Amino acid sequence: MRFKHTVHVLIDNFRVTYKLLVYVLIVAAITFGLSAAIIVPFVGSLSDVSAFEELTGAFNAMLTDILKGNLADLSLYFSDIKEGFEGLMTYLGEHPGELVMTIAGMGVVSLISGFFIGLGNYAAGSLINDKMAMQANAPFVATLIKNLGKAALYSVIYVAVSFVYTVVSVALLFVLLFIAFDGLFLLIQLCLFTLCMVLLIGLKMMLISDWLPAIICGKQSVVQAFRYSFSRRSGNSFAVFSFFASSCVLILAVNVLGALGSFGAALIITVPLSYLYLLCYQFVNYCDSNEIKYFTDKRTIVKPEHEKQTSREEFLRGE
């Protein structure tokens, strides 16, 4: 039922997709420019490394055969790519200076990008909450500016927590891929790697699923809302985890198929729509768990079985 309500709320808030799209494109353009300034010199320094030439040569040859419809030699290409990657890792291990500086620079860019994406998600969440609570259509920029202080604090904490979780997850996935899964057939390795990645992302999304709705809809402070979300006092943890894990697979499939089928043009819609889809579920799940009534569209209101009566003081305070 929550999935059904999420889809209805997503459709009702579809116009937010275009507002979020413009914002994400601006952030993506800035991120791309900063990343190119860091990566291009680093890649240029590897142009004379034999392992790098073997890796890029095998990858380009595989893509050429795929485009021609020749899929018979994919396993050989995978082996060549793996050997080239291992050789490149050996070289970088012997010459760590440029790699460390590049990783540090990309880490800073990732933190900056994550901070601004967090601001955009907060504003989009506020618009979704306004629509679900009152069928109001608030402007994106004005909402962002109005909530900038709390949104910035939320985004700073989110970026810090997400960064630590990502580092731990990448280290775990690296161990699994190159140690635990070593010796298995390459396609099985990739399948198990993707599965573990999806489970880790689903776990992260489950732990923070109530954070943003608790701030915006529940009127809690940023820290109180984080504690509430992380403690999972709302319950239904397995159901929430299952939703986010399955949604990761769905979003990945939709974006990849959209990119291949439209030469990348579909990503203009599917990427911000993916953010919006997850945000809608967070608010639907929070409202259902806390027995808060909400609009799924202008003619439909979802009411809890035991509706909480709002006092006169709470009504005047807007609670």
Image (cartoon, helix red, strand yellow):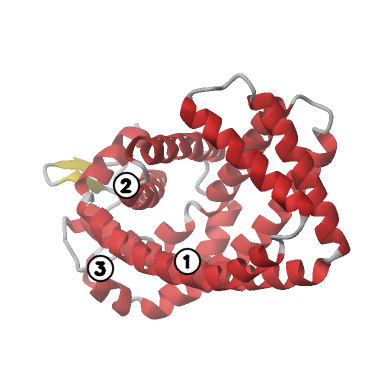
The answer to whether residue 302 is left or right of residue 229 is left
Can residue 125 be seen?
yes
Q: Where in the figure is residue 313, as x and y percent of width and height?
A: 26, 70
**Of residues 176 and 95, the one drawn nearer to the viewer in this rendering:** 95
Judging from the image, what secondary structure is the residue with disc 2 in? loop
Of badges 2 and 3, nearer the viewer stands 2
**Occupied quadrant, residue 21:** bottom left
Residue 26 sits above or below residue 250 on the image: below
- Image quadrant holding the C terminus, namely bottom left
Question: Which mark sits nearer the N-terminus, 3 or 1?
Answer: 1
Can residue 119 be seen?
no
Query: Which residue does the numbered mark 1 point to in the structure image?
Result: 32
**Occupied quadrant, residue 227:** bottom right
**Of residues 25 and 192, the one drawn nearer to the viewer in this rendering:** 25
Residue 32 sits above or below residue 266 on the image: below
**Occupied quadrant, residue 193:** top right
Amino acid type shown at disc 3: Phe
Query: Which residue does the numbered mark 2 point to in the structure image?
Result: 265
Of badges 3 and 1, nearer the viewer stands 1
Dot 2, crowdedness within 10 Å: few (<14), some or many (≥20)? Answer: few
Rounded to the nearest angstrom, the CA distance separating label 3 from label 1 is 23 Å
Judging from the image, what secondary structure is the residue with disc 3 in? helix
Query: Which residue does the numbered mark 3 point to in the structure image?
Result: 140
Amino acid type shown at disc 2: Ala
Question: Which mark sits nearer the N-terminus, 1 or 2?
Answer: 1
- Image quadrant holding the N terminus, namely top left
Q: Where in the figure is residue 126, as x and y percent of width and height?
A: 31, 63
Rounded to the nearest angstrom, the CA distance separating label 2 from label 3 is 24 Å
Residue at position x 63%, y 71% from top?
A: 41
Residue at position x 23%, y 51% from top?
A: 13
Amino acid type shown at disc 1: Phe
Residue at position x 37%, y 78% from top?
A: 148
